[in-house]
Amino acid sequence: MKSYLLLSLALLFVIVVLYAGLNGMIKDHSYGFFFTFVGGITTVGLGLDLVNHLRIRERKNSVRKLGRG
């Protein structure tokens, strides 16, 4: 439960940063490209964390099905 809350907060952060970056680029502010870049890189990292989390969860479920968990 705690990890889902953390992942959802990270997703919310990424959405806010990408919105601020795109809005800054549209309005020709100096921070627009930087926020868009940081948001994009953070999206990649969040995706990797989510895939890793799902793999660990699947592995734990497989071990429980075998009767060892």
Image (cartoon, rainbow, N blue to C red):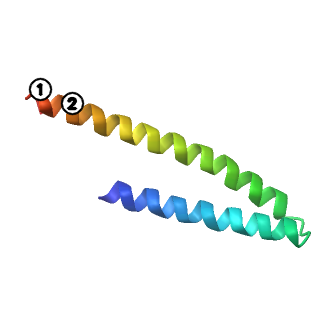
> The C terminus appears in which quarter of the rendering?
top left
Q: State the SS at label 2.
A: helix
At 68% across and 55% down in the image, what residue appears?
39
Where in the figure is residue 4, as x and y percent of width and height? 37, 57
Q: Please give left or right for residue 22 compared with residue 1 in the image.
A: right
**Mark 2 residue crowding within 10 angstroms, few (<14) / some (14–19) / many (20+):** few
* Mark 1 in CB contact with mark 2 (< 8 angstroms): yes
Name of the residue lying farthest toward the left: 67
- Which residue does the numbered mark 2 point to in the structure image? 62
Give coordinates of residue 65: x percent, y percent.
Answer: 13, 31
Q: Given the image, on which type of amino acid does mark 1 rest?
A: Leu
Q: Residue at x 33, y 59 (%)?
A: 2
Residue 32 screen position, x and y as percent: 83, 63
Q: Is residue 60 above or below residue 4?
A: above
What's the distance in space between the residues labelled 1 and 2, CA to CA?
A: 7 Å
Q: Which mark is residue 66?
A: 1
Please provide percent x and percent y for residue 33.
83, 57
